[in-house]
Image (cartoon, rainbow, N blue to C red):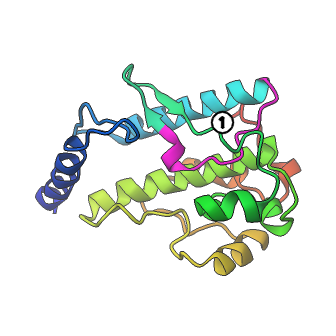
């Protein structure tokens, strides 16, 4: 299974290496060797980026795995600030990006509600689940292209579960302490979510 996972990884890397376009992020290197610590350190770096924004009273508003990249300095970077100041409704802003998988329940319930700092924390928690699903898929030699936080793609189903306080299923590689962190980041009540500085 490990050899099969490496083959899938290699195939995806080979495809990405072939891309050269000013509007596509260029891949400069890849490594199939890694540990969960590497993943968690990158997620922590992304949290530090979000903390920087929040300290300046900026809400990202569209946090998802695609908006966290690794820079040439090997540090995780938060990108795509297009919705930071323009997100006026879930219908307008998030239907375009399909980001309802990462949206906080209060944003799913009220289409006129602007994302908040607490909503960003929830979305970052969904990014953690997404990242764990990608690692889980690689370990199981499965395609990692469809590793959404919620296993279903239907917007109505995601909205129902999220607004009733249900979290996506726990990734099998997620340890108890890690799952507790995710639960605290993704509490149904925004006032009960941990602060980004605690993440």
- Asked whether, in this view, residue 69 is left or right of residue 3, the answer is right
Which percent across, then down, holds residue 61?
71, 46
Which SS does the magenta portion mostly show? loop
Which percent across, then down, holds residue 164?
78, 74
193 shown above or below 143: above
Residue 32 visible, this orientation:
no
State which quadrant residue 89 falls in: bottom right
Q: Is residue 59 magenta?
A: yes
| Residues drawn in magenta | 56-68
Q: Residue at x 66, y 36 (%)?
A: 199
146 shown above or below 49: below
The residue at which mark 1 appears reads as 199
Residue 18 visible, this orientation:
yes
Q: Nearer the viewer, residue 68 or 95?
A: 95
- Asked whether, in this view, residue 139 is left or right of residue 164, the answer is left
- SS label for mark 1: loop
């Amino acid at each position: 299974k490990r050899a099969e996972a490496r083959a899938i990884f290699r195939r995806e890397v080979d495809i990405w290496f072939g891309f050269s376009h000013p509007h596509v992020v260029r891949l400069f290197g890849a490594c199939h060797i890694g540990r969960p610590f590497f993943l968690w350190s990158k997620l922590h770096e992304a949290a530090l980026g979000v903390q920087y924004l929040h300290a300046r009273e900026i809400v990202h508003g569209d946090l998802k795995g695609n908006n966290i990249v690794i820079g040439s300095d090997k540090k995780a970077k938060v990108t795509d600030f297009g919705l930071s100041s323009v997100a006026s409704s879930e219908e307008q802003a998030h239907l375009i990006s399909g980001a309802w998988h990462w949206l906080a329940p209060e944003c799913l319930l009220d289409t006129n509600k602007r994302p908040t700092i607490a909503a960003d924390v929830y979305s970052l928690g969904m990014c953690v689940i997404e990242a764990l699903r990608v690692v889980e898929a690689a370990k199981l030699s499965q395609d990692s292209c469809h590793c959404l936080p919620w296993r279903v793609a239907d917007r109505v189903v995601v909205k129902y579960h999220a607004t009733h306080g249900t979290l996506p299923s726990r990734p099998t590689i997620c340890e108890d302490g890690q799952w507790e962190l995710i639960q605290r980041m993704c509490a149904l009540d925004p006032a009960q979510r941990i602060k980004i500085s605690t993440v």
